[in-house]
Amino acid sequence: MTIEKFELEFNLCDTIVEKNKILKDFIESGIDLDSNESKEFISECKYKIEDILEQESIEQDFLINVAIDNGDFSLYDCTESVEQYRKDSTYYVKVVDIADDYRKTGIGETNPLINELINSIKPIYWIVTDDGIGTLKRKNILSENIDFKKHFSKFV
C-alpha cells in the first residue's frame, strides 16, 4: 500500500475503528517503517486518532451531563465493590428495562412462548464514572452476569 492510497483511505474513514484498522493494515503492508517520512506520517495519523477520541470523549461528557440534568439517570450507592465500582461510592445509573417496555404493550399476554422470551430479557445498567472533579464522565454497561441489586441501592 502506498502512502497516498493509505492517506486517501484513512481520510475517508468515518469511525475510529475504521481508522485504526486502516493504520494497522498500512503498518503490516510492509511499508518501510525506518524512513523518517513513514515515521512522521504514522505519528500524524496516531495524533489524528487521539484528537478524534478526545473530541468524542468531550461530546460524550456533554451528552451525559444533559441526560443527568434531564433526570434520565438516578443516584445509586455501591453497597459492595464490583468491577471498577467501589463500595460506599455514589454513581449515576440509568436502567434500561426493555422487557418492561414489551410487557407494557401486552405483546406476551396471549402467547406463553413470547412471554417467556420477554421475561428472559435482562435490564441494561448504564453507570456513569469519572476520575474526579473536573474530569470527563463516561458511561459503562454493567456486566450481565453481575446482580445489580446485590451491589447497588438507590440513593436516599
Image (cartoon, rainbow, N blue to C red):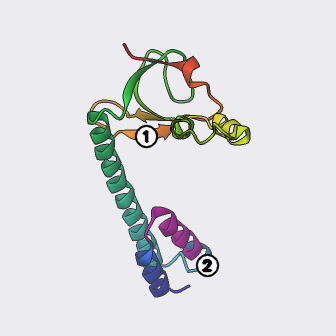
Task: Quarter of the image for the N terminus: give it.
Answer: bottom right
Residue projecting furthest to the top: 156
Q: What kind of residue is marked 1?
A: Lys
Residue at which label 2 appears: 29
* Residue that mark 1 sits on: 139
Magenta stretch, main secondary structure class: helix
Residue 75's place in the image compared with 137, above or below, is above
Where residue 33 sits, quadrant-wise, is bottom right
Front residue (pair 140, 102): 102
Between 19 and 62, which is closer to the camera in this rendering? Answer: 62
User: x%, y% of residue 99?
Assistant: 57, 37
Q: Is residue 127 above or below residue 21?
A: above
Q: Is residue 20 magenta?
A: yes
Q: Is residue 81 visible?
A: no
Image point 42% across, 77% down: which residue? 12
Residue nearest the viewer, comparing 128 with 11: 128
Tell me where residue 76 appears, x and y as whole percent. Answer: 42, 21
Which segment is the magenta one? 14-26
- Camera-side mark, 1 or 2: 1
**Magenta segment: does it hold 81?**
no
Which quadrant is home to the C terminus?
top left
Coordinates of residue 115 in the picture (x, y in percent) = 67, 37
Q: Secondary structure at mark 2?
A: loop
